[in-house]
Image (cartoon, grey):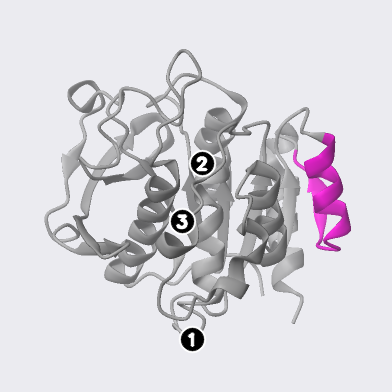
Amino acid sequence: MSASKVLYICQEITPYLPESEMSDVCRHLPQSIQEKGCEIRTFMPRYACVNERRNQLHEVIRLSGMNLIIDDNDHPLIIKVASIQAARMQVYFIDNDDFFHYKFTTADENGNEPENNAERSIFFVRGVLETVRKLRWMPDVIHCHGWMSVLAMLYIKKTYADDPFFKNAKLVYSIYDDAFKTPFPANVGDKILAEGVEPADFAELLPAADYPSLMRVAARYADGLVQSAAQIDPAVEQIAKESGKPFIVGSSENNYANYYEFYNSLLEQK
């Protein structure tokens, strides 16, 4: 079996955000995989710093309107979409005024991080998964980029373990140099809990939900790991190697061919 449908859950994508190692990979990797004959879907948060008019975002009414419950609070899910014409590629945006009204992504220009970054991550990944189900689209590979996407893999393996849209998908996590400095709050476990998810499923985050702990969650639930940045934290590299999961150093040479080969190698595993 070879990859024919690939879902990308991305923390950053250029040109909607400034160029970085992550935003550049998340822009060009999906295009390259699409050009290899695959069908793709690509998602990112609709941060307030994304200019809707310039980038021609518009709401997808048929996908919007759902409420997601986080820590007993309802939050409306708004789905927007835009196209990167040069790549013939659509990007879906997960939007909500409670979580994405900041004029920055995960930290402001002074490095200050919002207290609700954990809830923002939870809302983002759950919004992606519910939207994919609404699209009735069944990915072969789900590739997560950036720490904000990590919990998608937990929910796929637990909440959606028997869901036909996700249960056979292989999960890939790309590691970047994107550490956050402020640990998630002590009550983060209450916010992560969902159907099929118990505290033992994210024990790495209890009680210290810092960046290395979140990377341990990523290593636990990913089927394969990719180093997608030139340099990553040595401690995180060690976590990846100790996980025993298939691991590659990603390269953009030859149109990201090694990523595509990695996807197919994972799909060959039972």
Q: Which is more foreground, mark 2 or mark 1?
A: 1
Q: Is residue 101 left or right of residue 162?
A: left
Label 2 neighbourhood size at 10 Å, few (<14), some (14-19), many (20+)? many
Look at the image and tell me whether residue 236 can be seen: yes
The residue drawn where x is 17% and y is 57% is 64
Q: x and y percent of residue 2 in the render?
A: 65, 68
Residue at label 1?
A: 162
Query: Within the image, what quadrant is residue 29 found in?
Result: top right
Q: Is residue 47 left or right of residue 152?
A: left
Look at the image and tell me whether residue 223 can be seen: no
The residue drawn where x is 25% and y is 32% is 101
Mark pair 3, 1: CA separation: 28 Å
Q: Amino acid at mark 2?
A: Gln
Label 3 neighbourhood size at 10 Å, few (<14), some (14-19), many (20+)? few
Q: Amino acid at mark 3?
A: Asn
Q: x and y percent of residue 160 in the render?
A: 46, 77
Q: Are marks 2 and 1 in contact (CB under 8 Å)?
A: no
Mark pair 2, 1: CA separation: 30 Å
For residue 31, the mark is: 2
Please give the range of residues in magenta: 234-250
Q: Return the disc, 3 or 2, that comes first in the chain's sequence.
A: 2
Query: Within the image, what quadrant is residue 90 found in?
Result: top left
